[in-house]
Image: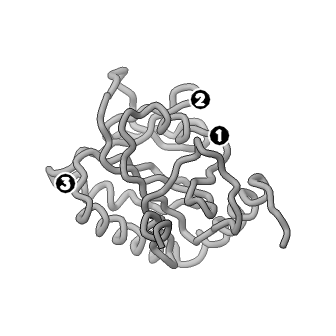
């Protein structure tokens, strides 16, 4: 069995996700968003971190719009500051910034919120259910700054899992992983 590096795994997953994003994307986006909504109804979070997707990521914008209409949830999205993230409330208009990521206008107000749930896009994951992202480390630094770790849902259009452990302890770990082909409750899988 060939041992693959994190960098090679990332490249393979990006290729797979780019191809996957060209086939039935709307159907996959809707399925994954519905699965996320089921978890939200089960977990009953108040403060939720979502993301504004890139082309090869699950488009959860309809989910964001639906959750915003309900008064039970406060919706936050990442905002890049240097080499880290801060969270800001989701609001329009959006601007396209570095790495082609859309963000709301920043109001210079620092939000100190205890997140209950975070939905995070991934490139892939490994046997330890830790995230492999684009390799910049924005989410890892952000999560390490939190006092309380929120329940975390990883999303990806097509499942891309390494058969060995590629990540480090500081990489974010999932509670749930949802792709167009499966949903895993990572804590139950770890216990089994």
Q: What residue is pinned by disc 3? A: 69
Q: Which quadrant of the structure image shows residue 141? A: top right
Measured Cα–Cα span from mark 2 to mark 3: 32 Å
Q: Secondary structure at mark 3?
A: helix
* Residue at position x 38%, y 67% in the image: 33
Disc 1 and disc 3 in contact, CB within 8 angstroms: no
- Image location (x, y in percent) of residue 84: 54, 31
- Image location (x, y in percent) of residue 22: 61, 72
Disc 1 and disc 2 in contact, CB within 8 angstroms: yes
How many C-alpha atoms fall within 10 Å of the one at disc 1: few (<14), some, or many (≥20)? few
Residue located farthest toward the right when viewing the structure as drawn:
2
Q: Secondary structure at mark 2?
A: loop
Mark closer to the chain start, 1 or 2: 2
Q: What residue is pinned by disc 2? A: 83
* Residue at position x 21%, y 49% in the image: 73
* Residue at position x 71%, y 57% in the image: 10
* Residue at position x 51%, y 52% in the image: 173
Q: What residue is pinned by disc 1? A: 136
- Image location (x, y in percent) of residue 114: 30, 37
Front disc: 2 or 3: 2
Q: Secondary structure at mark 1?
A: loop
Measured Cα–Cα span from mark 1 to mark 2: 8 Å
Front disc: 1 or 3: 1
Is 82 in front, or is 191?
191
């Amino acid at each position: 069995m060939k041992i693959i590096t994190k960098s090679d795994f990332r490249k393979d997953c990006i290729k797979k996700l780019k191809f996957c994003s060209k086939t039935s994307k709307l159907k996959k986006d809707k399925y994954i968003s519905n699965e996320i909504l089921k978890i939200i109804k089960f977990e009953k979070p108040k403060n939720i971190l979502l993301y504004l997707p890139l082309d090869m990521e699950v488009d959860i914008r309809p989910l964001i719009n639906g959750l915003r209409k309900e008064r039970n949830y406060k919706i936050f999205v990442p905002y890049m500051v240097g080499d880290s993230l801060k969270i800001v409330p989701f609001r329009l208009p959006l601007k396209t910034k570095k790495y082609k990521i859309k963000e709301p206008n920043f109001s210079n107000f620092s939000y100190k919120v205890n997140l209950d749930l975070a939905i995070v896009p991934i490139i892939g994951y490994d046997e330890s259910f830790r995230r492999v992202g684009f390799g910049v480390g924005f989410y890892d630094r952000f999560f390490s700054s939190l006092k309380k770790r929120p329940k975390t849902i990883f999303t990806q259009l097509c499942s891309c899992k390494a058969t060995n452990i590629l990540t480090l302890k500081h990489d974010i770990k999932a509670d749930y992983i949802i792709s167009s082909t499966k949903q895993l409750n990572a804590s139950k899988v770890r216990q089994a």
